[in-house]
Amino acid sequence: MRIHVEEGKMSERKGVNFPWWEAVSGILTRLLALLAIGGFLGILGMFLAQTFPNAYSFGRLLVQAGLAAMVPFLAAASVYILAIIARVLVTGKVD
C-alpha cells in the first residue's frame, strides 16, 4: 500500500496488483544465472585440475566455488516448488 497526501489529509491507496509468482520468478531468474556461473566455474576447474598438474589445487578451488554458487539456486528452487505444491493442496487451484 502506498500512502499519499491529498488536500491536507492522508489517505491509503492500493498499489499495483503484482502477483507474488512474478517476484519469485524474477528472483529465480537471477539464481539461475548463479547456477550457470557455478557450472562454468566447475567445468573450468575440472579442466584445469585434469589437464595441468601444477594447477590442480586451483582447479579444485574453482570446482568448490562453482558448487557454492549453485547452492542458493538449489535451495530457492526447492522452496519455490514446495510453495507451489502447498498452494495447490490448500486452494485446489492450479493457475
Image: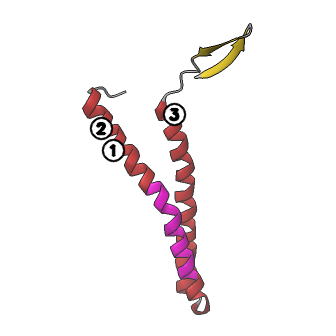
The magenta segment: 59-74
Overall secondary structure of the magenta section: helix
**Mark 3–mark 2 contact, CB under 8 Å?**
no
Per the rendering, the mark at residue 82 is 1
Residue drawn at (52%, 75%) of the image = 63
Residue drawn at (51%, 67%) of the image = 68
Say how the picture is coloured.
Answer: secondary structure
User: How many numbered marks are there?
Assistant: 3
Figure check: 42 above or below 5: below
* Callout in the foreground (3, 2): 2
Figure check: 88 above or below 10: below
Residue drawn at (57%, 54%) of the image = 33
Queried whether the magenta region covers residue 28, the answer comes back as: no
Provide the residue designation for mark 3: 22
Q: What is the distance, in whole Å, between disc 2 and disc 1 at their CAs?
A: 6 Å
Figure check: 10 above or below 29: above
The answer to whether 41 appears left or right of 93 in the picture is right
Amino acid on which disc 2 is placed: Ala
Provide the residue designation for mark 2: 86
